[in-house]
């Protein structure tokens, strides 16, 4: 081994690890990742088949791709996949490289979904699933591989034209099987709930039996209820900041349940199940506002909840609060059926004009 190679490799590795610090700005993170790629490329000149350099170069490229805001991410992902493939040719049984390769395929698929390229995303999800299955043959106890494979199955289920039901069912079965062995893994339970929510969202688009959708949303709500962490020093519905995503998801699920029961299941606003769902939605969006008070989306959703519940004055208060900060945030209100009960009110007509 040339004496310069380990210097360049360790330099690149340090830059890559530094780029993973969560508090860094986007520009600083990108610069560190670009510099790490340069060092790995320089190291490769001394040993073009070096497995460790190839894998970590792929990791840096993948992180760059995930942080890219435009279609350059596709080129970066393709470059990363090329490095993982080269590394696999060098040492086929390198489990770390296989895991990184499969994860990159999954993240690339997610990016293609964001870019509205379902066919490309489907192919990437399918390849990622194949890789994860290979990994689990070699390492049956790899819980991260099970989790990411389940996310791939759910992602593919959301866009697959034919086998969505079986894909979602398998994703949930994989995660629930893992959760039965790791019942205290809160992140894993959140993931199960998220897949249930994605499944319910797909059912809504496909106009599946509303009662089936209701059961899936209730399942998600029940699972996530065991994840939320209340502030031990508070007697009310105050949650730890680390629970914000789960609090918002619980609020979104509650509002989805209320809408489903009112619109698809044709229940009245006085129906106990509708009252409960609206009450939960109001409670969780209010809790989310305590954790992130400047997010106007929570005010908008609270206005939706109040309008659906027939509480016009409260809905008005939330909408006026939004208008005082950013009128653009009210564009959706013009066509949002949640506001049908107040659409004829003079103040609402004036507000959204």
Image (spheres, grey):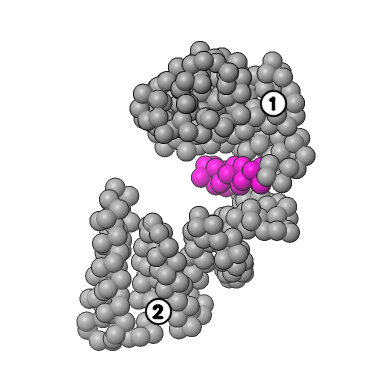
State whether residue 206 is above or below residue 79: above
Assign a secondary structure to mark 1.
helix
Residue 63's quadrant in the figure?
bottom left
Give x and y (percent) for residue 75.
Answer: 42, 70
Q: Secondary structure at mark 2?
A: helix
Q: Is residue 200 above or below residue 28?
A: above
- Mark found first going from the N terminus, 1 or 2: 2
Q: Position of residue 320 (x, y in %)?
A: 42, 20
Which residue is at the front of the view, 334 or 58?
Answer: 334
Q: Is residue 43 above or below residue 340?
A: below
Residue 51: image tag = 2
Q: CA distance from mark 1 to mark 2?
A: 58 Å
Quarter in which the N terminus is drawn? bottom left
Q: Nearer the viewer, residue 136 or 294?
A: 294
Instruction: Verify whether residue 343 appears in magenta.
Output: no
Which residue position holds label 1? Answer: 262
**Residue closest to the eye, 312 or 274:** 312
In the visual, does 112 lie left or right of 16? right
Q: Which residues are magenta?
A: 182-202
In this rendering, the answer to whether 248 lies above or below 29 is: above
């Amino acid at each position: 081994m040339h004496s310069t190679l380990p210097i360049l490799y360790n330099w690149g590795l340090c830059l890559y690890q530094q780029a993973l610090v969560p508090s860094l700005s986007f520009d600083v993170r990108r610069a560190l990742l670009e510099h790490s790629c340069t060092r790995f490329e320089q190291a490769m000149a001394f040993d073009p088949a070096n497995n460790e350099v190839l894998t970590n170069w792929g990791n840096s490229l993948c992180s760059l791709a995930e942080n890219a805001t435009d279609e350059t991410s596709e080129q970066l992902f393709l470059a990363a996949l090329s490095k993982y493939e080269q590394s696999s040719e060098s040492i086929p049984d390198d489990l770390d490289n296989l895991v990184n390769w499969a994860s990159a395929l999954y993240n690339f698929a997610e990016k293609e979904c964001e870019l509205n390229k379902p066919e490309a995303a489907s192919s990437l999800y399918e390849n990622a699933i194949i890789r994860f299955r290979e990994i689990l043959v070699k390492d049956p106890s790899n819980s991260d591989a099970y989790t990411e494979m389940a996310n791939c199955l759910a992602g593919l289920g959301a866009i697959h034209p034919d086998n969505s039901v079986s894909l979602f069912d398998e994703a949930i079965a994989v995660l629930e099987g893992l959760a039965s062995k790791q019942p205290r893994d809160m992140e894993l339970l959140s993931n199960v709930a998220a897949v249930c929510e994605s499944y319910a969202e797909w059912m809504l688009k496909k106009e599946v039996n509303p009662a089936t959708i209701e059961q899936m949303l209730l399942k998600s709500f029940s699972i996530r209820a065991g994840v939320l962490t209340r502030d031990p020093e508070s007697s009310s519905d105050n949650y730890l900041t680390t629970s914000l995503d789960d609090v918002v998801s619980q609020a979104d699920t509650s509002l989805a349940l209320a809408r489903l029961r009112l619109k698809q299941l044709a229940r009245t606003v006085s129906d106990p199940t509708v009252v409960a769902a609206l009450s939960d939605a109001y409670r969780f969006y209010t809790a989310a506002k305590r954790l992130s008070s400047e997010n106007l989306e929570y005010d908008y959703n609270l206005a939706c909840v109040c309008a659906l519940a027939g509480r016009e004055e409260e809905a008005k208060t939330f909408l006026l609060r939004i208008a005082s900060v950013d009128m653009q945030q009210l564009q959706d209100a013009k066509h949002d059926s949640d506001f049908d009960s107040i659409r004829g009110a003079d103040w609402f007509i004036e507000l959204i004009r």
